[in-house]
Amino acid sequence: MDRLTPSLGRLIGAAMLVCVPATAVLLGLTLWGRLSVGVALVAGVLIWTFTALLLRSILREFMVVSRHIRGLGGRSEAGEGPAPTPRLEIAQGLLGAAQHLDRGWRRRTQALRDQLRSDEQVLNTLPDPLLMIAREAVVTRANEAARSLFGRDPAGQEIITLLRDPGVLDSVERVLAGGTAPRQTIWVMPGAVEREFEVRATPLPSPSIDGSVALLGLHDITALRRLEQMRADFVANASHELRTPLSSLIGFTETLSTSAKNDPEARERFLAIMLEQGRRMQRLIEDLLSLSRIEMEEHTPPDEAVALPRLIASVTRFLEIKAREKTMTLSVEAPPDLPPAIGDADQLSQIFQNLLDNAIKYGRPGSPVEVRLAVVERGPPAMPAGLRAPCLRVSVTDHGEGIAKAHLPRLTERFYRVDKARSRALGGTGLGLAIVKHVVVRHRGAMTIESDPGLGTTVSVFLPLHGPRPPRRAAPSA
């Protein structure tokens, strides 16, 4: 039977309901003796039959309209087709009212969808990571910054698996328990470079449609903390290291203005020393500022592709004159198909300039300085696990006096010198390897130092590869 045709039971029920007044009249006439029982029964059956036939078409139109209205509500596919054209005015009015209501709901639904997309876009453009949290302490949604911070979409995970910090978990628990005031705490994110965040848990005015009841915002204050530390370190280091050259400049200036005022020979000698002390202070301040800038950027790794052979060739050309002054040679060995590294070209140039400059300073006159580049199967444990295999290794080897093993762990400390007098005489500031270390850490790489007294020193820098990783080769690992 057609689903739009009224069933027999429904038709009989509707006809009986409509025929109640007529049936009552027939019953009354029969009781008063105006009609016989047979005539009354025949009349009743005829009335019911004609009423049912009339109601059949009326009910069919209402069923068509009803089915279309259910389709508009999403309960069937009928609402997607063309609207019916009922003949009855009441059915037309009912259909028009339903269509007007449907258009209003569709407009409101589209407006809500647009608003949700707009809100989602706003959240994704915010620089701070944001997490929406349900009553069960489960993340329901996260913006783009949060997905980038955790390296995945944290939606569906419990907050305890993301932020393993008692202070943060206590703040979240208090807000979820019904607290109305925002809760704020500090969270240090572990990793190769620690990052510090100000975490703020805020309850929502009412639960959202996805069950979120609280918002967790993470504001990165790493740069601010590093700036504060940089200021303190700069004052402490500068005041200590600049004391000696400043004292020398003051002493020579006083001498030139008094006892050596009319002594041309002493004046020439003192001015040369003063110039050297001034240049020493200049190098020291430049290295301190460079180190501070690197530390400020340490928590943001670079993402450029850098061709190391070309960069190192540029550095060696710059230092060739200095090497020739000691009759030393600079050699670079690199495979022709060496892939690029991930890095900041300026900072990588600073790394290899410092390493080559040290090799020239402390190498024996007439000896070679050797630079070797290769892809190794695995870097040292100091590198992040996901970047260790394979990676690029750049080794700088000199043939100088070498360094005792007891000094190797401290070589990257600021102002640490194995031979202070020799280092200062050669123009060293004690910050070269500290700068190298911080640049390498920013690049999520690693550095190793190997030295044999009397034979020389090899400093190796390991850097992650850029782009698709090449197949593993037979080059030795660290």
Image (tube, rainbow, N blue to C red):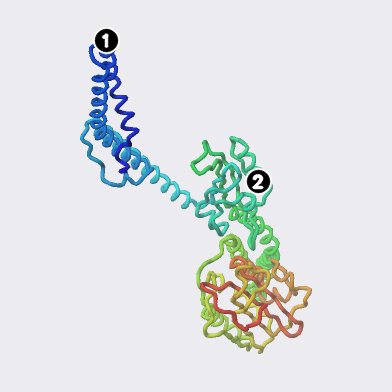
Q: Which mark lies nearer to you, 1 or 2? A: 1
Left or right of 291? Residue 31 is left
| Amino acid type at image mark 1 | Trp
Position of residue 252 measured from the top left corner of the image (x, y, whole percent): 68, 68
Look at 63% across and 37% down and name the residue there.
177
Q: Is residue 54 visible?
A: yes
Residue 207, numbered circle = none
Picture quadrant where residue 395 is located:
bottom right
- The residue tagged 2 is 169
Picture quadrant where residue 392 is located:
bottom right
- Dot 2 falls on a residue whose secondary structure is helix
| Amino acid type at image mark 2 | Leu
Say if mark 1 contacts mark 2, CB within 8 Å. Answer: no
Position of residue 25 measured from the top left corner of the image (x, y, whole percent): 26, 16
Determine whether 435 is above or below 199 in the image: below
Look at 32% across and 35% down and name the residue there.
8
Position of residue 349 measured from the top left corner of the image (x, y, whole percent): 55, 74
Look at 66% across and 79% down and name the residue there.
477
Picture quadrant where residue 62 is located:
top left
Instruction: Bin the neighbour count of mark 1 within 10 Å (Cα to Cα): few under 14, some 14-19, many 20 and up.
Output: few
> Residue furthest toward the top?
32
- The residue tagged 1 is 32
